[in-house]
């Protein structure tokens, strides 16, 4: 399951959205001439996707109590988030 998830998540970020975000956020920062903006965007996206994958794994462990799920707590979470 985790291998499947990691393969599926390789390109989870919309590159165009990330590019526009970085353009705005980096307006006041000078990017060195030997770093292409497109490479910077792609590297930032990959870095973020790797971090997201790790975050997802950590939350999976926490939510399912490291393989020993507390189903009553999960039912409460389902009820809580169903109200939103």
Image (cartoon, rainbow, N blue to C red):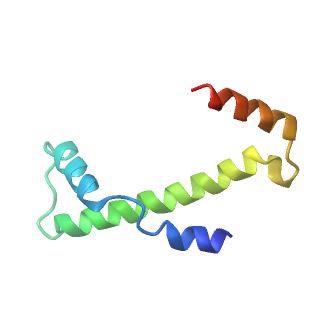
Picture quadrant of residue 49: bottom left
| Residue 70 against residue 67 in the figure, above or below | above
Q: In the picture, which quadrant includes the C terminus?
A: top right
Is residue 8 toward the left or the right of residue 36 in the image? right
Query: Against 28, is 3 above or below?
Result: below
Q: Seen in the image, is 54 located left or right of residue 78? A: left
Q: Position of residue 32 (x, y in %)?
A: 15, 62
Residue drawn where x is 13% and y is 52% of the image = 30
Please give the name of the residue rendered at 78% of the width and 38% of the height, measured from the top-left corner.
Answer: 74
Residue 25 picture quarter: top left
- Of 67 and 41, which appears nearest the observer? 67
- Is residue 67 shown above or below 70? below
Q: Front-most of 28 and 14? A: 14
Q: As drawn, is 67 to the left or to the right of 51?
A: right
Whole-percent x, y for residue 79 in the image: 71, 29
Q: Residue at x 81, y 34 (%)?
A: 73
Q: Position of residue 51 (x, y in %)?
A: 50, 57
* Labels in figure, total: 0
Residue extending furthest toward the front: 82
Residue shown at 49%/62% (left/top)?
Answer: 50
Quadrant occupied by the N terminus = bottom right
Q: Nearer the viewer, residue 4 or 22?
A: 4
Q: Quadrant of residue 18?
A: bottom left
Please say if 33 is above or below 83. below
Residue 75: x and y in percent read 79, 35
């Amino acid at each position: 399951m985790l291998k499947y998830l990691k393969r599926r998540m390789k390109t989870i970020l919309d590159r165009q959205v990330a590019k526009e975000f970085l353009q705005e956020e980096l307006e006041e920062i000078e990017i060195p001439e030997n770093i292409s903006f497109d490479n910077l965007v792609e590297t930032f996206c990959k870095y973020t996707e790797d971090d997201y994958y790790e975050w997802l794994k950590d939350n999976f462990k926490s939510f399912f109590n490291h393989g020993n799920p507390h189903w009553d707590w999960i039912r409460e979470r389902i009820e809580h988030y169903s109200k939103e």
